[in-house]
Image (cartoon, helix red, strand yellow):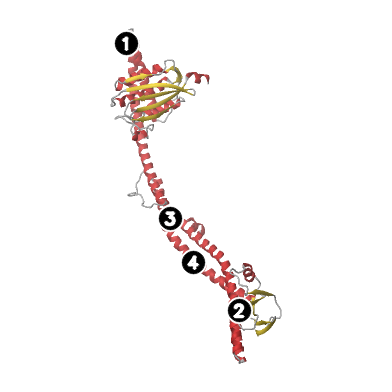
Amino acid sequence: MLQNIFMRRLSNQLLVLTVLFVMVAEILIFIPSAALFRQTWLAERAEQAGLLTLAIEGVPNYEGGEMLSSRFMHNTDVTMVAQKRNGMSQLVLGMPPPAGRIILADLRNERRLPLFRDSFRDFFGDGKAYIRILSEPTVEGVDALEVLVPQRALKDAMLDYCRRVLLWSLAISLLTGVMIYAALSRIIVRPIRKLARGLAKFRQDPRKRAGLETPTARSDEIGQLEREFLDMKSGVRTALKQQEHLATLGMAMAKINHDLRNVLTSTQLISDRLASDPDKRIKGMGERLVRSVDRGVKLCEATLAFSQSAEEKPEPRSIAISKLIDEAGADSMAEEGQVQFINAVPDDLMVKTDPDHTYRILHNLFRNTVQALQKSPEKTLKIEAQTDGGKAVFLISDTGPGIPDNVHKNLFKAFTSGIHKGGTGLGLTISRELARAQGGNLSLQSTGAEGTVFALSLPLAATTDND
């Protein structure tokens, strides 16, 4: 249980991994170092035996030579020292073992890198063999110096060396782990903990600001993560604030549309009476007023449905759209001002669409264009059509000043693309939704100082009917 709790923290995992990696590195280094230690240990015994041979031959007193030999054999664990002359071994001190396996180690053939297999054999062996060391002689007239040491003594020395290396490796790994732990804890772990606490607080109450939030000056990945977190919090708070405004606006729109629909119902009764007047002029005006009132009622219902996130289902039918374009253009100019209106759409071009929905699309586009043209010296609004793959594409172009860059980015987003004072920014959003609901689309093709061009696509009547 305590182990699981300990390993949950990133800093503790870093400490354990650091110690583990250092120990693995020490083990990889220990293998060649142990081989070098074995070679050095054997060379030291051979060198000391050579010096002892010189001392014994230089001291004529036998008792002094016996004393040196006893001390040497006790300190070095050497069993026998002999000199080889003319292929014969001359015993200097000690006695050869009565029985036992002999392992040859010829130091006269120097190797820069010793054999690892010899080190493994002596380290993991049973220690019952003897190692016969052959080295360069120290006395003239001798072919080689021969030293015999028990394998057990070499194995004990290597085990002691291994223990010392292990203790030093543990000390180094712990020290390295603590230093890396402290560095990483300050550079990585603490900032991540701070981010985690901030994320938890933000999740509990996204609207609450916990003090002054300033971007970090770090230029690494942690600094980028902190800056992205601040940007995310700012964006979420802005979205929540906008959502509250939209909810409030939706409630207000619902109330206004409810009352406005009642007013238009009374107006519709009056327009119906005018449409039934025997005077043709009054009857024509009444019929047009009836259509306008009907569109107003449907507009209120559609706006109310939009505020409730409900989709309005279109009722498409085949119509000659040129007449609908003239009607939308005339109504737009009657509301916003006169411009040169050019309808280049053929009278016989038939599309399959919902007339009321398409009228709203055209009316929104024309009204925005007429408003923009009031500030332009040349006031021309033109609409032309072309066919493309079973659809009619209408290009609505003007000679206006163009759409500002700050509006261009959010042109089709609700409540963000209002260009004119008093606008809600809903017109183009609703228009695109109405176009796509009928199998078409509405997009901005180009804008600039020379004018703006919108592209409206709607299904052709003949292609749709064949389907």
Q: Amino acid at mark 3?
A: Ile
Q: Nearer the viewer, residue 363 or 415?
A: 363
Reading the image, the residue beneath label 3 is 188
Q: Residue at x 33, y 8 (%)?
A: 280
Q: Nearer the viewer, mark 1 or mark 2?
A: 2
Q: CA distance from mark 3 to mark 4?
A: 23 Å
Is residue 100 shown left or right of residue 188? Answer: right
Mark 1 is surrounded, within 10 Å at the Cα level, by few (under 14), some (14 to 19) or many (20 or more) other residues, namely some
Q: Residue furthest top?
A: 278
Disc assigned to residue 46: 2
Tag nearer the camera, 3 or 1: 3
Mark 3, other Cα within 10 Å: few <14 / some 14–19 / many ≥20: some
Camera-nearest label, 4 or 2: 2
Q: Residue at x 45, y 60 (%)?
A: 181
Residue wearing tag 4: 172
* Mark positioned earlier in the residue sequence (1 or 2): 2
Q: Is residue 190 visible?
A: yes
Q: Earlier in the sequence, mark 3 or mark 1?
A: 3
Q: CA distance from mark 4 to mark 2?
A: 34 Å
Residue at the image point whose x is 37% and y is 25% from the top:
397
Q: Which mark is residue 282?
A: 1
Residue at mark 4 to residue at mark 1: CA–CA distance:
104 Å
Residues 183 and 8: in front is 183
